[in-house]
Image (tube, rainbow, N blue to C red):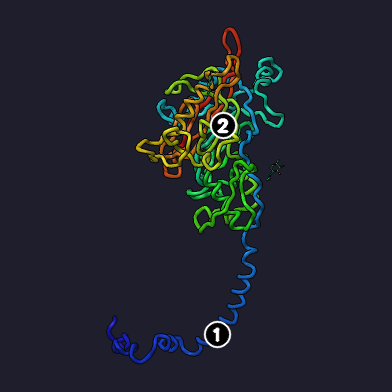
Amino acid sequence: MVSETTPLQRPNDYEDEEFSPFERFMVRIGSSKRLLWALGLIIGLPIVYFLMVFLPSLAPPSADVPDLIKVGKAPVYLHPLIPPKKLELVNGESTSDKYNDPESPIKNVPNFEKWSLLDKDTKLFRRHFKKLGAAASQKPVKRLILIGDVHGSLFELQKLLKHVKYDGGHHDHVVLLGDFLAKGKNSLGVLEYAIQNRVDCILGNHEWEILKRYVQYHGLPGVGFNESKNELRATEQYDLDEQMRIAKRLMPEHIDYISKCPLIKELGPVPRMTNKKRRKYASVPANGVAVHGGLVWSVEDLQDQDPEAVLTMRNLLPPDYTVPTENRHEVVDGEKSKPWTRFWTRHQLEVAANASDDAFTAGTKVYYGHDAKRGVCFREFSTGLDSGCVYGAQLSAEIIWSEVVSTKSEDRIVYRNLFTQINC
Ligand SMILES: *[C@@H]1O[C@H](CO)[C@@H](O)[C@H](O)[C@H]1NC(C)=O
Ligand SMILES: *[C@@H]1O[C@H](CO)[C@@H](O)[C@H](O)[C@H]1NC(C)=O
């Protein structure tokens, strides 16, 4: 096939000797093509000019970032529930074999639709409500659902919410524990989904980084917390990294959502477990707060915690263990740093022991994310919920509710929780 029709080969050295590369190029395309090139330039240049002038208007409209909130309150409180009769519970919940392995963290989640709200006119409710001190603006809900680092894993977030039977915000209140953006496939999708499905949030280090890039990209004045003591403003210059790529695509409604995620969110009373196997509840609930990274035990007032540390800390440094670090392996004078949760729990045990006998709550329990390497971690005054979904592990949720328990002598309201997760 090749033989007859193959054109004569020119000698190898022919082109290099006689013509410059440019001349060879011009010969090859011929004179009519040269005309086309000229025409192309005449038409193309104005188009390029037009794009350069008007391209900025193709960027999304920008919105000033309002002052971020350092300590916010969940807009809900847990209304005490009356569980359905035992028999109903068994009939209703013993269907899915897949989730019934007692060792599995993937638990069957009770159908809370069948749990009724305690009547507001009862003495029990009124007494409880008074102690609760709920603001008039706070809405009663049946469940608080706290979810660890989502990192743009929209499909998995939807799967987990389906697994816990999220009711879309009617009687449930979901709080994402920060870092719901970046790393994963669909950060913008998670944002849109959270906005549309009334999913609440706290700020993570990734959201903070994205906000800083957003103000740089749009040339806005800055972003930070309204507090001279803990001023935190964006000053650095950023390259086009993943967080910048997300920042560039944010619309004003996204900024509105992210900037309302507080650094620290107060959750109201939450249950605490007094033993490692998580079988025994303490008789008095703790005050719940949600943060992305952690809190320093020696700083009494939440308002005095350092924002950047709250977003990023994992450990505390020796010798005093009051200086936070993100680096799990940091060593000072040959001494290892240790998890902040250890000191937090030790300190809160003391705070709880000092509480008066009739106190409604004792100690502060922290729900956090940010530490996928350590993973899910339960201590008496802290619960870590980042189980590394974006690395193909699990997405985890802690479900919290309050419940009426009737004994022979009295009716009491207790706080309960259920940990569950899905595979990513
Ligand atoms: C901080 O917030 C207060 C009250 O909301 C406001 O009066 C004040 O102007 C704010 N300060 C700054 C620096 O924005
Ligand atoms: C608990 O009470 C003791 C005695 O009043 C006090 O010395 C200690 O500082 C208190 N601890 C905390 C964490 O409040």
Element carrying mark 1:
helix
Q: What residue is pinned by disc 1?
A: 38
Residue 227, image quadrant: top right
Q: Residue 289 got which mark?
A: 2
Residue type at mark 2: give it.
Answer: Val
Q: Considering depth in this image, is 203 or 18 the residue closer to the camera? A: 203
Q: Determine whether, in the image, residue 319 is placed left or right of residue 296.
A: left
Q: Where is residue 339 in the image (x, y as percent from the top left)?
A: 43, 34
Earlier in the chain: of badge 2 and badge 1, it is 1
Q: Considering depth in this image, is 134 or 239 the residue closer to the camera? A: 239
Residue plotted at (61% across, 54% down): 215
Residue 406, image quadrant: top right
Q: Considering depth in this image, is 339 or 139 the residue closer to the camera? A: 339
Residue plotted at (51% across, 29% down): 109
Element carrying mark 2:
strand
Q: Position of residue 342 (x, y in %)?
A: 44, 29
Quadrant including the N terminus? bottom left
Q: Position of residue 217 (x, y in %)?
A: 59, 58
Q: Considering depth in this image, is 338 or 318 the residue closer to the camera? A: 318
Residue 185 in view = yes
